[in-house]
Amino acid sequence: MELTWGIAAIWLGLALVASLLAIRFKMSVALVEILVGIAAGNLVLLLDHFRVFGFHWELKPNEWIGFLAGFGSILLTFMAGAEIEPALLRKQFKATFSIGIAGFVGPFVGATLYAYFVSGWDWNAALICGIALSTTSVAVVYAVMVETGLNETELGKIILAACFINDLGTVIALGVCFASYNWTLAMFAAITVVVLWIAPRFVAWFLKRFSSHVSEPGVKFVFFILFVLGALAASANSEAVLPAYLVGLVLADVFARHRDTVRRLRTTVFALLTPFYFLNAGMKVYLPALWVGLGLVVILLVVKMATKVIGIWPLTRMLGFPLREGNYTTLLMSTGLTFGTISALFGLTHGYINQEQYSILVTVVIGSAVVPTMIAQSFFQPEIEPPVAFQITASAALPPSSKESEKRQGSVSQSQDSQRAMDS
């Protein structure tokens, strides 16, 4: 028992350090937690190798840490889906769907083929590579949107919705490529469809009926749904993040009317659960193996960014985006973080990729979270004249939001929610 409390103290101490560093350097805490995990994991390996102070140094996650990390990834995915505005998806379907699909297909095909035919990875490992590099980072993009004020503009909302479409393709590909096609998969698909159909009305009633109780039965009910669908996904050899993402989307309107519940849910997710997931993901990166594959890291990062640009930039011109805004959209859609690490960790834990391949993929994902963002913010950030939000005026297909002024009045009270959500 003493050892268990000691392990918990070490992990939460690392999470605290990551939070303070993220605040100090104004970075996404998810990215910093991965970096802290990499540093801590490799430092412990170094200390153990040289038997410093004569101790056996070890920082491997035990069973309960693994559970908290898995639960964190599911809730993180659920919250990402719940942040999307379904009304905007319907309103700007052409722009968001085309950009999101192009952002997924290009890197998925390009990275998969490069890993298989050029790098010599087996087919399953190449698929994991393609899936991990096909993502875009809701965490990074949302952080940039909030910091620049673009989250209140039509352009910012279109980019966020396109990120959702992109990542939806990623989680579907992860499920389709590695699921066991048998009766358990059919049962999982059927139950998921039924749950997605009835969940909005039932959860809305449940939250309205029990929202005032301190025991939070509404939140527990959502957890129950996610656990049931996660168990069914695991039995079908799929990934629990797929139903979690879809449930988050169908409940987005419900949670928009229950902001207090969302706030309390975010506190649970970001204060306790996601640090275990991202620290665990970082600790699995082995730096000596990464050094050997450094050239491949650079090449795969170029492959991801190049295929994103080839697929997305021409679409922004066809849809009437001004040149500066088209470049900005393309670069932000080239980022990756959360779902990239989820996909890579799925491949490692299921034996589809080895430790070296995992280290390479996570490093590429981290690089894609930093490099495109820095370029976009340094050279192509759209100008916003306060208090008027930026609008795309070059295309009738991208009309300005009629409710921006009303939303801006509540932006001060929502800023804390946005700051927490950006770290998802």
Image (tube, rainbow, N blue to C red):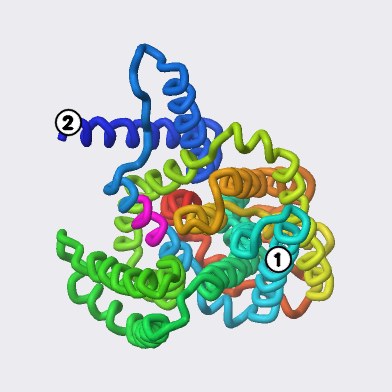
Kind of residue indicated by mark 2: Glu
Q: Which residue is mark 1?
A: 391
Label 1: element kind: loop
- The verdict on residue 33 being magenta is no
Q: Is residue 137 left or right of residue 65?
A: right
Determine crowd level at label 1: few under 14, some 14-19, many 20+ residues with C-alpha closer than 10 A.
Answer: some
Q: Return the residue at label 2.
A: 2
Which quarter of the figure is the N terminus placed in?
top left
Q: Quick one: 386 or 24, which is closer to the camera?
A: 24
- Mainly helix, strand or loop, the magenta region? helix
The picture places residue 219, in percent across and down from the top left corner, at 26, 65
* 48 versus 118 height, above or below: above
Return the disc, 1 or 2, that comes first in the chain's sequence. 2
Distance between the alpha carbons at the discs numbered 1 and 2:
58 Å
Q: Nearer the viewer, residue 209 or 121?
A: 121
Q: Position of residue 334 (x, y in %)?
A: 69, 56
Q: Answer whether residue 156 is visible to the viewer in this image.
A: no
Of badges 1 and 2, the one in the foreground is 2
Q: Nearer the viewer, residue 333 or 291?
A: 291
Residue 30 visible, this angle: yes
Instruction: Name the one closer to the observer, 64 or 264.
Output: 64
Q: Which residues are magenta?
A: 69-75
Label tally:
2
Q: Amino acid at mark 1?
A: Gln
**What residue is shown at x 32% (from left), y 31% (from top)?**
10
User: Image height check: is 56 above or below 202?
Assistant: above
The image quadrant that residue 353 belongs to is bottom right
Q: Which mark is residue 6?
A: none
Residue count near mark 2 (Cα–Cα under 10 Å), binned few <14, some 14–19, many ≥20:
few
Q: Residue at x 18, y 66 (%)?
A: 212
Q: Residue at x 71, y 60 (%)?
A: 116
Contact check, label 1 and label 2, Cβ < 8 Å: no
